[in-house]
Amino acid sequence: MGRNIAASYLARAVNLLAFLALAPIMTRWLGLRRYGEWLVIASMLPYLALAGMGIDQTLVNRIAAAARRREQINGLVSTAFVAYCVCAGLAIVLLLLAANPIAKLALPGSAAEVARPLLIVGVFYCAALPLNAFAMALRGLERVDRERGAAAWAGFGGAVGLGAAAIGGCGLVGLALVQGLAAVGRGVVAARRACALNRAAIPRLKAFSARTLRGLIRPSLGFFALQMAGIIGFGIDNLVIGHVLGAEMVPRYAVPYLLVMGVEGIFATFQAALVPTIAAQYARRDCSGATATFGLSMRLALLFASTGAIVFLIAGPALLRLWAGVGVYPGATAYQLQVSLFFIQVMLEPPHAILVATTRHYGAAAIHWLDSILNLALSLWWVRRWGLAGVIAGTVAGRCATSAWYLFAAALGVLELACARLLRELARPLALAGAAGLAALLLSAKLAAGATVARCVLAGGLAAALIAAFAALALSRDERRALAGELRRTIGKAGYA
């Protein structure tokens, strides 16, 4: 588990550092309009992952439950690989037919510039889809470290290539080629690692099983619904802004949003690394460990969300302007709502991990769909009234009305955990987070808006104080020892991938 978490954080760190390095390059070398067009293209790419029909997570869970039975693993990988190939071929055909209409819908004023690079990068992404079978095999075999290591190398190479293409003036087509090649390269590295780790991960056509495919389809449809709802919930904002306000407004919203969600991804990575282990425990009907992990994860989520929100709200605006330029700040209201979404999403990661790992996700898929539809409707309505702030307000309102309460209720039901017990466990952490947040508001109000150094010092001091208080008052001695030992092992193994 420590090895998997270490590699997961390595890949996440590479992606976050790549974004931190690329954003100022893109805004300065491409300009806000061209960068906005690229961000809209990038926002469409996750939709291509839907061609996999949600098989990814089902494949991970089934391989984890197979307990290293070679024949069963080979049948799962082979069946999934063939299914991916068929889905990828159909997706390429649809993309060839729909690239121009999609570009006209997303960016009416830039359709001619966007259609060709969208088609190029889309074909590469579809070609890389069958290679997902190997990445999921590594996850199911509890070697997340090898899969995340492949992602880290691809992320690093892609970032270098994108920066060179932007500085070299290669335009959107050059960016599309680099992004597409990085996606294929990631899959190739994962394939080599999976096949070297376990020969059962090598697909064989004769091992394809229609019965196995039928067994994958039903739970995969639920994961597909979750995946689509998540993409709509988090990826639709840029498309709404590009369609209504134009490409040049997209970076003002997207850069701070990607920053706060990139930091949120640090905690999401921790939870995702635990999913295969939780799935294996649940298959053995060992729920006590999952319950204990859930309680600790909730406390850590509260600490992470509170600390991040304090730093973002106090020091974030000044650092954002200094880093990426004044033109990327969306305004105080929109930015504060983005930080609110960061807090909400961090708190939803632990219950979401429970539902995904136990394949009890069908209700979550339905509620995510409702969340996404509400988000889209409100964003389209409010963007015309309040601009960028209306877009993020629609996202926050939709999340609070749906997923924010349902995921907790569903996870508690799976674990057979009483809500009162969870609230008792979180009472002290909630009090600490509330006190730190109130102190942040009071002290921040006394500082001038442009006092960048003072705000950074204040944010760092409050964050450190909150972490120390949590360690002393919200974690047991055994938990502190376990976390400290895990942290040392994580740091020691971070270079393994």
Image (tube, helix red, strand yellow):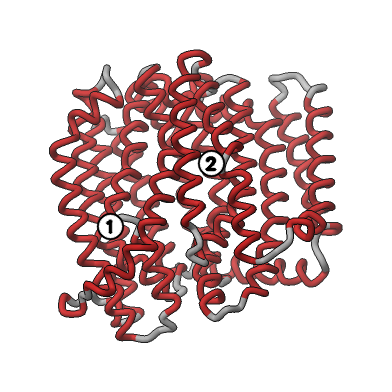
Q: Are marks 2 and 1 in contact (CB under 8 Å)?
A: no
Pick the quarter of the image with the C terminus: bottom left
Q: Position of residue 195 (x, y in %)?
A: 29, 76
Seen as rendered, the residue at the extreme top is 385
At a point 71% along the width and 49% down the height, the residue shown is 302
- Number of other residues with Cα within 10 Å of mark 1, as a class: few under 14, some 14 to 19, many 20 or more: many
Find disc 1 in the rendering and name its residue: 185
In the figure, residue 199 lies in which quadrant?
A: bottom left
Find disc 2 in the rendering and name its residue: 261
Element type at mark 1: helix
Element type at mark 2: helix
Q: Nearer the viewer, mark 2 or mark 1?
A: 2
At a point 46% along the width and 68% down the height, the residue shown is 145
Q: Nearer the viewer, residue 467 or 67?
A: 67
Measured Cα–Cα span from mark 2 to mark 1: 25 Å
At a point 77% along the width and 47% down the height, the residue shown is 464
Q: Nearer the viewer, residue 258 or 296?
A: 296
Q: How many numbered discs sit on the rendered protein?
A: 2
| Residue type for callout 1 | Gly
| Residue type for callout 2 | Met
Mark 1 or mark 2, which is nearer the start of the sequence?
A: 1
**Residue 258 left/right relative to 491:** left
Q: Position of residue 285 (x, y in %)?
A: 57, 78
- Number of other residues with Cα within 10 Å of mark 2, as a class: few under 14, some 14 to 19, many 20 or more: many
Whether residue 485 is situated above or below residue 259 in the rendered picture: below
**Residue 117 left/right relative to 420:** left
Q: Position of residue 165 (x, y in %)?
A: 28, 37
Marking on residue 362: none
Q: Position of residue 373 (x, y in %)?
A: 44, 35
At a point 79% along the width and 29% down the height, the residue shown is 441
